[in-house]
Image: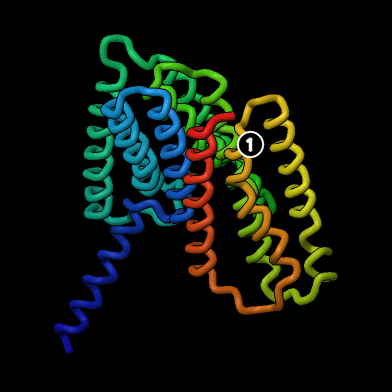
Amino acid sequence: MASETSQLAALSNNRRVGSLIGPREHGAWGLLLVPLATGGAVGLLFGGSVLALLAFTIAALALFWLRTPVESLFGAGVVRAQTPQERRTVGIAIVTLATVVAAALTALFWDGRNRELLLLGLIGFLAFAAQAALRKISRRTRMLSQIVGTIGLTITAPAAYYVVTGELNREAWTLWMANFLFAVNQIHFVQLRIHSARLNGWAQKFQHGRNFLLGEALLIVALLLAWRFQFLPWMAALAFLPLLVRGTAWFFERQKALVVRRLGWTELAYAIIFGVGLIAGFRLGY
C-alpha cells in the first residue's frame, strides 16, 4: 500500500514538473510548426541553405518551449513554481533552453547574416506581449488573444523562408498571410464547436455561427484577390478548400457529442493537409 502511494505521488509530481516546464497549449505546436515547415519547404524550392533552416528550427522550438518555464518561474502562467525544488527544476530548464537558443542564434547571425530576423523577432515579441495583456483584460478577449498570439506563431513562415533564401520578399509575406488566415479560421472554428456543442439544427447553428460564416466568406474574397493580383498561386489557394468545406458542412451535421481531443486531432490533420497543399501550390507555380 505504501509503495502504491509512493508511486502515485511520484507520478503526480512528474506531471506537475511537466506542467511547469512543458508547453500546455498543444494546439499551438501545430500553429508554430506548419508555418515553419511551409516557409522552409517553399524556400528550399527556390534553392537555399538546409543548415540555416535547421538552426532556425532549433531556435524557434527552443524559444517556444522557453516561454512556459519562464512564466512558471515568475508566476505569469497557470501553474507556478512554488517550492525551492520546483524553482530549481524550472531554472535548470530555462538555462538549458536559453543555451540552445543562444547557440542556434549565433549560428544564424554569424558573420552578419540574417539581420532581418531581428525585425521578424520583434513582431513576434510584440504579438506575444499583446496576447498576454489581452488575457488579463477579460475572458471575452480570449479568442482575440489567441488570434493575436497567432501572429507571433505564424511569423515563422516568412522567417524560415528568409533564412533559407536570404530574401524577405513577396513570397515570404504571402506565406505569412496564408498561414495566418488559416490559423484564424481554425481558431474560430474550434471556439465555435466548443461553445455550440449542444446546439442542434441549421437555425440554431446559424444564429450562433453567423460570424464564422461571414469570416469564411471574407476568406474566400481574400483568396480570390490574392490569386487575381498574383500574390498566391491558384493551386496554393486551393489548399484552403478542405478547411472551407469542413466549416460549412458543420452547419448541416446532426448533433453529436463533442470530443475535444478528437477535434484537436482532426484539426491537426487539416493543418497538415493545408501545409502540403500550400507547398505543392507554390511548387507548381502561378
In which quadrant is the C terminus drawn?
A: top right
Instruction: Indicate left or right for 209 with 247 as reference.
Output: right
User: Viewer-proximal residue, 167 or 283?
Assistant: 283
The structure residue drawn at horizontal position 83% and vertical position 64%, both measured from the top left corner, is 207
Above or below, comparing residue 108 to residue 136 in the picture = above
The structure residue drawn at horizontal position 45% and vertical position 31%, both measured from the top left corner, is 42
Label 1 sits on a secondary structure element that is helix
In this figure, which residue is indicated by the disc labeled 1?
Answer: 234
Q: Residue furthest top?
A: 112
* Amino acid residing under circle 1: Trp
Q: Residue furthest left?
A: 3
The structure residue drawn at horizontal position 75% and vertical position 66%, both measured from the top left corner, is 251
Q: Residue furthest bottom?
A: 1
- Colouring of the image: rainbow
Report x, y in % for residue 192: 68, 61
Dot 1 crowding, Cα within 10 Å, few <14, some 14–19, many 20+:
many
Above or below, comparing residue 201 to residue 263 in the picture = below
Residue 190: quadrant of the picture:
bottom right
Report x, y in % for residue 43: 42, 27
Whether residue 163 is visible: no
Whether residue 6 is visible: yes
Q: How many marks?
A: 1
Report x, y in % for residue 201: 79, 75
User: Viewer-proximal residue, 85 or 286?
Assistant: 286
In which quadrant is the N terminus drawn?
A: bottom left
The structure residue drawn at horizontal position 33% and vertical position 55%, both measured from the top left corner, is 82
User: Viewer-proximal residue, 239 or 79?
Assistant: 239
Report x, y in % for residue 209: 77, 60
Instruction: Indicate left or right for 116 with 235 as reference.
Output: left
